[in-house]
Image (spheres, rainbow, N blue to C red):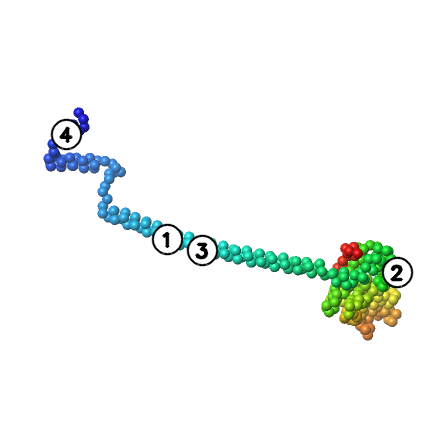
């Protein structure tokens, strides 16, 4: 028999109400016997409401998170744009500063390169005398005849002598100093377009450059007589500013004097005056570096 045949055979059989009640009681009794974890109790109305409320609460929380998260993203995007703009401005400012620094360096370099230009052009005829004297090995007497320091006759090569240009008195005219870096061989200036030969050094009569453009001269007549004279350049002339004299002929016991009136002082006091005019090394450009 097929399932359909069985179903049709019992289709007209209907249980009574008493039978239905017994069947339901049996089912419920069997249900009570099942383990607790297998029972499926129908949730009460309170439980259903709590579940529903929790669901709505979760949805609300997610909505708040999405809202603030979106706002944060928008703010972050704006902040990122602002940060990018600030970074661009900073980079532009930095680049502009670098350009200014490089321009300042270039200007400084140009000034350094042109510092000796005046001496190399305006005073060139004078400089050529020294170059010729050194190359031709002229003796001190011949150098003196050329109106340059006779000390040039002792220089053996072009790298042993050089020049330095500087405005010593601040009048806008650069003076020319010919030197070995220590003592001044000759000092020149220009007045009304004419080159003026101010001083020339030789044995027992040496000149040195001091701070503030002061020129210190040491002269000696003998072991008993010598002097230190400090000069300041004014235009095309040298003005004596201070003098310290050693004169054992006048006073063998107290030979030191200061000032033009020769006020007697101790040796320590005299030396203090001399030291108050500190000498500086002259930053020359050697003749060997020039084009002659």
The label shown at residue 245 is none
> For residue 241, what is the image quadrant?
bottom right
Task: List x then y, in percent, for residue 173.
Answer: 74, 67
Indicate which disc residue 67 carries: 1
In the foreground, 94 or 290: 290
Find disc 2 in the rendering and name its residue. Answer: 142
Quadrant (top left, top right, bottom left, bottom right) of the C terminus: bottom right
Write down the quadrant of residue 104 in the picture: bottom right
For discs 4 and 1, the disc positioned in front in the rendered view: 4
Say if 141 sits above or below 50 in the image: below
Please, what secondary structure does the residue beneath circle 4 have? helix
Residue at image position (73%, 69%) is 171
Q: Disc 4 or 1, which lies upstream in sequence?
A: 4
Return the disc, 2 or 3, that comes first in the chain's sequence: 3
Count of picture labels: 4
Asked which secondary structure carries label 2, the reply is helix
Label 3: state its secondary structure. Answer: helix
Q: Is residue 139 left or right of residue 16?
A: right
Residue at screen point 74% across, 68% down: 169
Crowdedness near tag 1: few (<14), some (14–19) or many (≥20) residues, C-alpha within 10 Å: few
Distance of mark 2 from mark 1, alpha carbons? Answer: 101 Å
Could you say where residue 249 lies in the image, as x and y percent from the top left?
Answer: 88, 70
């Amino acid at each position: 028999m097929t399932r359909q045949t069985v179903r049709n055979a019992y289709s007209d059989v209907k249980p009574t109400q008493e039978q239905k009640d017994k069947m339901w009681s049996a089912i419920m009794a069997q249900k009570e016997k099942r383990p607790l974890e297998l029972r499926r109790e129908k949730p009460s109305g309170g439980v259903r409401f709590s579940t529903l409320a929790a669901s709505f609460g979760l949805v609300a929380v997610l909505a708040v998170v999405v809202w603030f998260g979106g706002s944060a993203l928008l703010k972050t995007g704006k902040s990122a744009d602002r940060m990018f703009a600030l970074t661009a401005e900073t980079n532009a400012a930095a680049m502009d500063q670098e350009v200014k620094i490089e321009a300042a360096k270039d200007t400084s370099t140009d000034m350094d390169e042109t510092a000796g230009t005046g001496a190399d052009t305006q005073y060139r005829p004078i400089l050529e005398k020294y170059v010729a004297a050194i190359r031709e090995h002229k003796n001190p007497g011949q150098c003196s005849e050329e109106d340059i320091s006779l000390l040039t006759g002792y220089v053996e090569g072009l790298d042993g002598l050089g020049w330095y240009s500087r405005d010593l008195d601040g009048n806008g005219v650069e003076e020319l100093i010919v030197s070995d870096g220590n003592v001044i061989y000759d000092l020149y200036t220009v007045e009304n377009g004419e080159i003026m030969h101010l001083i020339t050094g030789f044995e027992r009569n040496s000149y040195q450059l001091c701070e503030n453009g002061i020129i210190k001269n040491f002269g000696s007549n003998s072991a008993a007589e010598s002097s230190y004279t400090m000069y300041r350049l004014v235009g095309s002339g040298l003005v004596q500013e201070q003098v310290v004299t050693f004169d054992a002929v006048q006073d063998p016991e107290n030979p030191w004097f200061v000032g033009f009136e020769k006020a007697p002082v101790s040796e320590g006091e005299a030396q203090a005056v001399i030291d108050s005019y500190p000498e500086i090394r002259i930053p020359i450009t050697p003749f060997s570096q020039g084009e002659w």
